[in-house]
Image: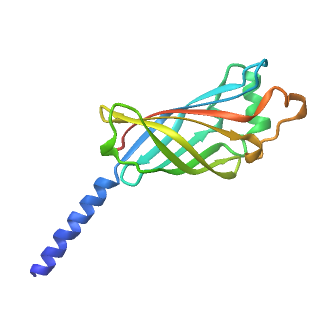
Amino acid sequence: MKNLKAISILLVLFLFTNNLQAQKFYTENGITTFDGSKAAFEPIKAVNDKTISIIDVGTGEIAAVIYIEKFQFRLGLMQEHFNENYLKSDIYPKSKFEGKIKNFDINELSEDFSDYEITGELIIKGVKNKIKAIAEISKSEGKIFIKSKFSIMLSDYGVKIPKIVFKKIDEEVKINLNFVYEKKI
């Protein structure tokens, strides 16, 4: 009977410890911007302030979903071309990222931003590629803040630029992330 009680206590402690490590932080208002502009031409920039992302602070795993139609352009015609001709949001309505923050430890975060490497797989238009980026991460008032900048090549994701506008749209698109996560209850 004592062994059963000891095993029960160990099992409860194990489950409790795993539950603490499985804390998740979440945002559904992450800001993702991209810039596909070439100098001397009309800026090709968009903002999506509805990016969904989650971090498992026990493992450092991170995931995000970006709904393509949520990108807002300065010009409606650009937005229409982006959705219909380039990203085909009716067929591929979202982009996904799944990865890991290297050496992530929530207990080491402070109000000052520190650099962390994030690696993972980004899916755009059904095409999956590995990416690596540096993110600045901090913690304040129970929230986690992540800022990151990286670039992707459109051709790596099957995005074709017509010759007529090739000189106006950069093949290398710069992406900026600015996410504020709160503890998921």
Q: Position of residue 91 (x, y in %)?
A: 73, 46
Residue placed most toward the observer, 58 or 66: 58
Q: Quadrant of residue 110?
A: top left
Residue 119 position (above or below residue 138): below
**Which residue sits at x=73%, y=39%?**
87
Q: Nearer the viewer, residue 130 or 67?
A: 130
The residue depicted at 49 percent of the width and 42 percent of the height is 53
181 left or right of 12 in image: right
> Is residue 57 left or right of 173 when viewed as pictured?
left
Q: Residue lying farthest front? A: 115
Pick the residue in front: 157 or 101.
Answer: 101
Q: Nearer the viewer, residue 165 or 19?
A: 165
Q: Position of residue 13 (x, y in %)?
A: 21, 64
Q: In the rendering, at what x and y percent does residue 31 appear?
A: 53, 31
Residue 168 lies in quadrant: top right
| Quadrant housing the C terminus | top left
The residue under the point 34% across, 45% down is 106
Query: What residue is rendered at 78% in x and 17% in y?
Result: 40
**Residue 117 shows in the view:** yes
Q: Is residue 60 above or below residue 160?
A: below
Q: How many marks?
A: 0
